[in-house]
Image (cartoon, rainbow, N blue to C red):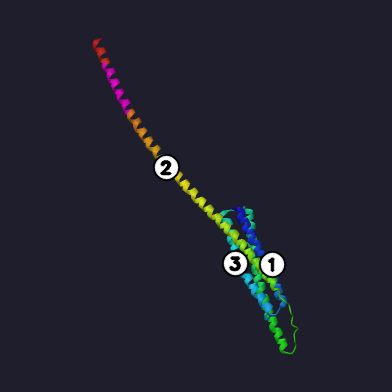
Amino acid sequence: MALVDHDLWDIEYEGCERLRHQLLVQLHQRQQLGQPKAKEYIQLTDSIKAGLDQLDKDVKHLKVVLDNAITWETSPEEELQQRRIDWDKLTSQLREVKQKFTNSSRANVLAASSGSAWQEQGQPTAPRETPIDVEALKLRQAEMLEDQNRGLEVLSATISRQRNLATQLGNEVEDQNNILDNLANAMDRVETGVQRETHSIGQVNRRDSTWGYWLLIIALFVAILVVVLV
C-alpha cells in the first residue's frame, strides 16, 4: 500500500506542477497580446480560468492524499514531512499565479482603456496580430485530461487496496473475538473444575479428620483396659 500511495502522490504532484507551468506560459502569452477585446485574449483568459479552477481542485485533492498518508502511516516520517513542505510551497505558488492573473487582467484593462483614449484624441495605435496556436491548447488540455485520468486510476486502485485492507482487518478482529470467546469458555471450564476439585479435597479432609478421632478413641479405650487389667 505504501508503494501505491507513493505513486499517487508523485503523479498528482507532478500533474499540479505541469499545470502550474502551463498557466504561467498562458499568462505570458496573454500579456504579450495585451488586447482584452481580442478573440485570442478572451480564449486564453477562459483557458487560464479553467486551469486555475482545475489546479485549485488538484491541490485540494493532493491534501487529501497527504492526510491519508499521515493517517495510515504509509510512508516514513521524513518523506511525509517533505510532502508537507512541497504542498505548502505548491499552495503558495497557486496563490501567486492567481494574483498574477488578477494583476495582469487589471493592467491590461487599464492599458486598453488608455489606448482607446489616445485613439479618440487622434493618435492611432498599431494593432498587434498574434495568432494563437489552437492545436497547442487542445494538446495541453488533452495532456491535462490524461494526467487526471491516470490520477483517478491510481486513486481507484488505492481505494480498492484500502477497502481490502479494511476487510482483512475486520476478519482479523472477528477471528480475535472468536479466540477470546473460546478462551473465556476454557477459563469457565477450568474454574468449574477447580471448584469441583476443591470441594472433593474438602470432603477428603473432613473424612481424614473423622478417622483421626476414631483412632484416638480406640487408643484411649485400649489404654483404659490395660490399666484395669494390670
- The spot of residue 121 in percent (x, y) is 73, 89
Q: Amino acid at mark 1?
A: His
Categorize mark 3 by other alpha carbons within 10 Å: few (<14), some (14-19), many (20+): few
Position of the C terminus, as image quadrant, is: top left
Tag 3–tag 2 contact (CB < 8 Å): no
The residue lying at 52 percent from left, 50 percent from top is 168
Which element type, helix, strand or loop, lies under badge 2? helix
- Find out whether residue 211 is within the magenta segment: yes
Badge 3 or badge 1: first in the primary sequence: 1
Q: Which corner quadrant of the image does residue 191 belong to?
A: top left
Q: Left or right: where does residue 1 sit relative to residue 30?
A: left
Residue found at the far left of this picture: 228
Q: Amino acid at mark 3?
A: Lys
Which element type, helix, strand or loop, lies under badge 3? helix
Residue indicated by mark 1? 21
Residue indicated by mark 2? 184
Tag 3–tag 1 contact (CB < 8 Å): no
Q: Which corner quadrant of the image does residue 99 belong to?
A: bottom right
Q: Amino acid at mark 2?
A: Ala
- The spot of residue 186 in percent (x, y) is 42, 39
Categorize mark 2 by other alpha carbons within 10 Å: few (<14), some (14-19), many (20+): few
- Find out whether residue 76 is within the magenta segment: no
- The spot of residue 225 in percent (x, y) is 25, 13
Residue found at the far top of this picture: 230
Q: Left or right: where does residue 228 sit relative to residue 35?
A: left
Tag 2–tag 1 contact (CB < 8 Å): no
Q: Which residues fall within the magenta stretch?
A: 205-221
Categorize mark 1 by other alpha carbons within 10 Å: few (<14), some (14-19), many (20+): few
- Can the viewer see residue 93 in this picture? no
Residue indicated by mark 3? 57
